[in-house]
Image: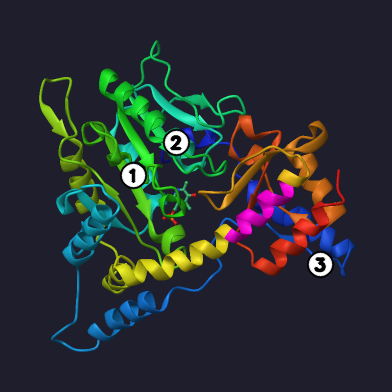
Amino acid sequence: MPKLNEHYQDLKESYLFAEIAHRVAAYEAEHPDAKIIRLGIGDVTLPLGDLAIKGLHEGVDAMASAETFKGYGPEQGYSFLRDAISAYYARNGVSVDTADIFISDGAKSDTGNISELFDTDNVILIPDPVYPVYVDSNIMNGKNVTYLSGNAENNFLPMPDPSVHADIIYLCSPNNPTGAVYNKEQLKEWVDYALANEAVILFDSAYEAFISDPELPRSIYAIEGAKKCAIEFCSLSKTAGFTGTRCGYCVVPRELVFTASNGQEMSLHAMWNRRQSTKFNGTSYIIQKGAAAVFTEEGMAQCRENIAYYQENARIIADTLKRRNIRFFGGVHSPYIWFECPDGMESWEFFDYLLNNAQVVGTPGAGFGENGKNYFRLTSFNNHENTIAAMKRFEHLF
Ligand SMILES: *Cc1c(COP(=O)(O)O)cnc(C)c1O
């Protein structure tokens, strides 16, 4: 009989989206004429831009003739795409070397897999509330995590406590689910703390393209010293609508070298390269062709049009909450709006209240951590018409 990885027993049941679907289906069965509006969507809805589609077609056509056919590609990704990403960083004022970029099928894989590079004996800080992948991937590997409390007092932007040591720190900015974004001073505090503790920051920047204020950092490498302490994860999912197409990338700087217990120097870049070469055979050439088109200036301009559409929805939601005097977070540099449930309701209670009284579906904050249990997430990924209709229904609630 195999002895199983019993750490899987330590995972919390991931029932969030199943439970939402279940409650909505039950309501629909009882109210067949109800016009339910879904503002819980954590996925993009607009189609890919023309240039991404053209790039994908070129990739497909290349497979049709012996001269251009592609078999296995480099595990790290094709240099045409890695160069295009390095150039994209440069246009945003950040220098990232092509050699430090690894292409993948998405940031979920990378943020989930990275924990393999670290021992169980580490102090690991993870924000609460946050994207559940960081916690679950560490629990699967038998690791203990310490939560960094995000709350209304710190605007859901937890800061380092210099009196407490950490080895590994996960940060997500702009944050899912709260939409909160660290500014440069705040991120510098984290980088300085990591350098002082010889810690590594695992920085998830999946929503960087939603940042519209040039003063806010879209990459941790906008902060001096970050290449000595940070790995960055990015994705084309929210930037370019690639949630179904699948492409992401991470930056593992060669400066990230730490001393092992036997005194040997170990490079995280070399370890990640070895890990990827052993367990991953690269992202499809076709997808990488589409992705490279996204990182041209014209390709990115098309992505920005879609992002502006979502941002307009976020503004409509934010305006309604402001008018109703409901304090919220996010909604500007993020597709997410996060607010405290009115009248002291808990998040599942408010979910039912909203479904029953407005036929609007959102996401209970409890699904993102203890600190979310009185909060609620709405997203801007539905269309304008539905977003406006849902917000009209908000005017008469609570
Ligand atoms: C959506 C999302 C990602 C992207 O995941 P992919 O696997 O690239 O689709 C990464 N991190 C966060 C916080 C997200 O919300």
Quarter containing the N terminus: top left
Task: Check disc 2: other Cα within 10 Å, few if <14, some if 14-19, many if 20+.
Answer: many
Residue 226, image x, y percentages:
26, 34
Quarter where residue 187 is shown: top left
Q: Tell me, for residue 392, which label it has, or none.
A: none
Residue segment shown in magenta: 312-321
Q: Farthest residue to the top: give it.
A: 163
Q: Are marks 3 and 1 in contact (CB under 8 Å)?
A: no
Say which of marks 2 and 3 sits in front.
2
Task: Check disc 1: other Cα within 10 Å, few if <14, some if 14-19, many if 20+.
Answer: many
Say which of marks 3 and 1 sits in front.
1
Residue 352, image x, y percentages:
81, 47
How is the rendered protein coloured? rainbow
Quarter where residue 58 is shown: bottom left
Question: Of label 1 and label 2, which has the lower sequence position?
Answer: 2
Secondary structure category for the residue under label 1: loop
Residue at left offset 19%, top offset 76%: 70
Is residue 90 in the magenta section? no
Q: Tell me, for residue 35, which label it has, or none.
A: 3
In the image, taking residue 307 as reference, residue 204 lies left or right, namely: left
Amino acid type of the residue tagged 2 in the rendering: Tyr
- Residue 287, visible in the rendered structure: no
Question: How far apart in space, not on screen, are marks 3 and 1 (Cα)?
Answer: 41 Å
Q: Tell me, for residue 182, which label it has, or none.
A: 2
Residue at left offset 40%, top offset 34%: 170
Q: Nearer the viewer, residue 393 or 363?
A: 393
Secondary structure category for the residue under label 2: loop
Residue with the mark numbered 1: 219
Residue 120, image x, y percentages:
34, 26
